Amino acid sequence: MQILVDQTLLKGKKAQAIRSVSSVQAALTQLLRGSGLTYQKRGDAFLIIQDARPSKSSADIAPIERQAVADTQVASGEDIGAAGNSETIVVTGSRIARPELESPMPISVVNMQQAERAGRFSAYDALQLNPAVAPGLGFNNAVSNQNAGASFVDLRGLGAERSLTLVDSRRRVSASNGSSAVDIGMIPSVMIDRVEVVTGGAAAVYGADAVTGVTNVITKDYLDGLHISFNQGISQKGDGLQTRASIATGGNFANDRGSFIIGGTYTNVGEILSKDRRFSRNLSQIWANPANTGPNDGIPDLIMYRNQRSQTVGYDPSYLLNGKRYTFNENGPVAFHAGTVIVPESMFDGGDGANFYERQRLQGDYESYAFISKVAYKLTDAIEWHGRIDYGRSLYDATYINLFRQDLRANQAGGRGGDRAYLDNPYLPDFLRTIMVDNGLSELAIERSYANFPLIQARHDRDTFTVNSGLSGALGRLKWDAFWQYGRSTDEITYVGIPQVSRYAAARDAIADPLTGQAICRDSTARAQGCVPFSIFSQQPLNEAQHNWLFGYQPVTRRTNTQNIVGGNISGDIFDLPYGPLVIVAGAEYRRETIEMRGDGLAQQGDFTHSPLGIDAFQTPIDASQSVSEAYTEVVVPILGDLPFAHRLEIEGAYRYSDYSTGITTSTWKAGGSWEPIEGITFRGVRSRSVRAPNFGELYAPQRFVASGQPIDPCSSIGNYNASPTRAANCAALGISSPIPAYSDGPTVSSGGNPDLAPETSNSLTLGVIVRPKFLPGFDLSADYWDIGIDGVIASFSAATLYNLCVDLPSIDNPFCAAQTRDPATHKLVSVNTFLINAQKLNARGFDFSANYRSMLGEGNFHAGLMGSLMTKRLFETTPGQPAGDVNTLGNSVTPRFKATLLLNYDVRDISFALTNRFVSAGKIDLTDIEEQLEGNRIRPYLYTDISIGLDVAERYKIVLGVNNLFNTGAPQVPSASGGWNVGGYYDVVGRYFYTTVKVKL
């Protein structure tokens, strides 16, 4: 809660008077008596306004609003926690104290109490109310990511590695194995006051990684009493149960020379399976249209099949005999009902067979504990010591490819081939033995997936620890601050459901014991080690002995990141100019970061080969460190003020020099200003240059070489060979004069870091206007244009992208063809290199706007807030200078063009109402600018509505009932490499969700 008051009203005795009064209303009545001012309750805030009656006060609404946003923090209920803090706050985007609406850089603030009213109970969820914030990494959009279970911020959808996350304006240790991203899920929600977002280059103020902006999580500094809250909710389908419990307290000691605050939050989030939601129940994929004859023939080049099923990965085993596939189980042949043929005798749209991702999760199991403790003590009247400890631990079960598919990864990488039926296998069904004998076969290849095996999962056990100590004080008109901070983040990952290849290969090859007739393993060495055979033909659950033999060893990997920071700055008024003081900040910082990664020794020997690309257990060790020394300065210069057409005119600038231990030196800067020609209308703009040095993951990630599955080879029968004359001509130049048959033994894909990477450089521009008309008290509007261009983008092209770029550029003389190798006889893809490189340019631009209106409505207080973000360009130049290589990434399910959030609140007496609407614009499934590219190439717009009602009971208790996604709006079914269902983030994957919150103040 906040009190919006002109700062001059909260100084001296009046501030102390408020602190001693329990009721905000009573405090404000006492404070404002005789001033000609009164107040209105605006949701979780109180707004000071002119009394409608005649008044001797000359105060007006605009300066009061402008100077008081977030000035004074209120703990909860109606207790004022920090009323003594009467100074203008330092808003994110600058280190110079000023109100947020006077900053030349666009700054948006999400108040945590407001977010909770909208059904958002974590910093990550609260940020999703801001349309300029992309989903980043969260529970609903990264269930199989290597960083699954963490929550990372991604501004504008340009990458979490280009968005800097701060906590109380300080950097935090990374929680990622491949970037500097901070896990904001480790911040207890009970301790969060607000989250500030600057969507523009801020590297000159805060350093590298702030290319697209800064997210600053501001935690509470003061609490009075004991605060307890409990929240629980569940989807209407009875899954996805979420529970949160928080407790916090604080106060003063040593005759008010010291203060403390401590609080923590427990969170538990239940799983949701993809098969339990309509939009994710089936797998959708895009394939070449077999009816297509070429460009401009009026026939769609591509078809999206919405229920792709594979016979070869079905739960029932199958075999190929005389060019025809047959399916069976231990009881005999099974009639296979095929849908529309995609790949003959293998893949179909509809019918029987398996969806390789149907046991995947939309939301994984998550549990976390997090707390923050702060202490401050005035050593003298001019010097204060402050210290804090932050700790968080989380447990998360991430699902990878959820079916153990024997034919692709389990054995071929180990040189053992796929499953095979032999005549002396005691588990061999009689009917299949007869078929083999009749056809003169001594062995027969069997293909299937094992639904009776455990899910393949990575269980993350994370903890993050930060300790901070510092001194601050005043020296005349200047303020100074010095601090030391240490942070450590660990992630221990245990992989389950992955059998050892050597044990699996031995257990599947069974023979009958000559003495007992019981099934035993053929390999005598394996038998001596305790080998327990199993049937490759059965779907019965494994017994304990079989399970222990196959899955008794679980690979474990551990990653540890550390961060040491020492820094300090001095700020304040240097001297007075004719229209105000010259304000400057100067500071320096030294930061050292390390990463240590240890894979599993047995896994590194190649005995665990069934895995998706990039599982950490299979990597070689990493020990790396990097340090940087930085110096920075920022200045704000008032030029004119209180003049005609120059009510306020000021300019500002910032510069930062960084020297990295890797030998890289960078310089970043920003320049901008604000012009308020008449009171109530302000124009603002900032031009900035940012430089992002490559992070640990980009530099040192180990090189991996992994066999892939069936590729969508653009020169094959399933790869749309005739998509364009250029593609056909380039395929012919590769020696492929007509489409080659589809093949399932895909190329070996190599990936990894690159120690020779150079920094990215970025230029950004923001231009905006702020309107606060005096004739409409309580209303403000801001609109900003932004443009970001990044050169030398560090990126790794996916194998599928490389396939297409090779043949879609003007000739095959390009780096993408050079990264591929084809078999000279069959022309199949044999290998492809996807290592990170400084290859691309990225250009993005758009418009952001926000509008707020606060007013009395009847006997209550009404607030409406609208935020919107329109992106007009997001273009990758994969080969700068060759337009044919440009890739448009704007307008699909991952980067919608327009997002907006409307917040409506109404408070009357002890009852509060909240209504939230979140809009995602329509888009396309395939962004290729070809009219006949894909039939049904459209994603409809989506609108999600949340409601809540709260009741204050006896001043100490508050109860809130809410429904998120009131109309049970789903999500689009779109194709993707991860199964075509992973659209969590912009779109809701939970469905209608009911929750209750209870808060107690003691």
Image: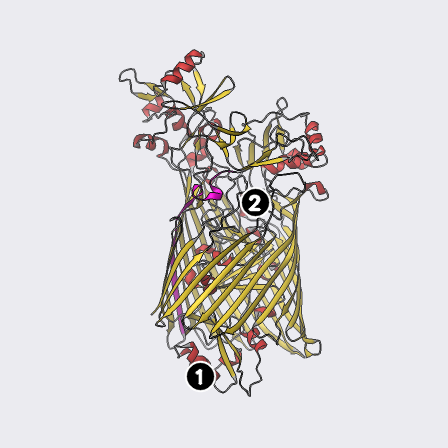
Q: Residue furthest left?
A: 516
Residue 117: say if magenta: no
Is the Cβ of the residue at disc 2 closer than 8 Å to that at disc 1? no
Instruction: Please report the residue visible at 32 percent of the width from the left and 24 percent of the height from the top.
Output: 528
Label 2 secondary element: helix
> The C terminus appears in which quarter of the rendering?
bottom left
Instruction: Please report the residue visible at 39 percent of the width from the left and 16 percent of the height from the top.
Output: 433
**Does residue 145 appear in the picture of this structure?**
no
Compared to 443, does 53 lie above or below? Answer: below
Instruction: Please report the residue visible at 70 percent of the width from the left and 44 percent of the height from the top.
Output: 880
What is the three-letter code of the residue carrying label 1?
Gln
**Does residue 79 appear in the picture of this structure?**
yes
What is the three-letter code of the residue carrying label 2?
Leu
Q: Nearer the viewer, residue 337 or 469?
A: 337
Residue 92, quarter of picture: bottom right
Colour setting: secondary structure
User: Where does residue 161 sit, x and y in percent of width and height?
Assistant: 56, 51
Q: Mark 2 to mark 1: distance in Å?
A: 61 Å
Residue 645, quarter of picture: bottom right
Label 1 secondary element: helix
Marker disc for residue 939 = none
Mark nearest the camera among 2 and 1 is: 1
In the rendered image, which residue does mark 2 sit on?
699
Q: Nearer the viewer, residue 657 or 28?
A: 28
User: Where does residue 496 sit, x and y in percent of width and height?
Assistant: 39, 38
Task: From the viewer's perspective, tell me whether residue 179 is left or right of residue 506.
Answer: right
Q: Earlier in the sequence, mark 2 or mark 1?
A: 1
User: Where does residue 443 sit, x and y in percent of width and height?
Assistant: 43, 17
Compared to 333, does 105 lie above or below? Answer: below
Marker disc for residue 30 = 1
| Residue segment shown in magenta | 258-283
Residue 261: say if magenta: yes
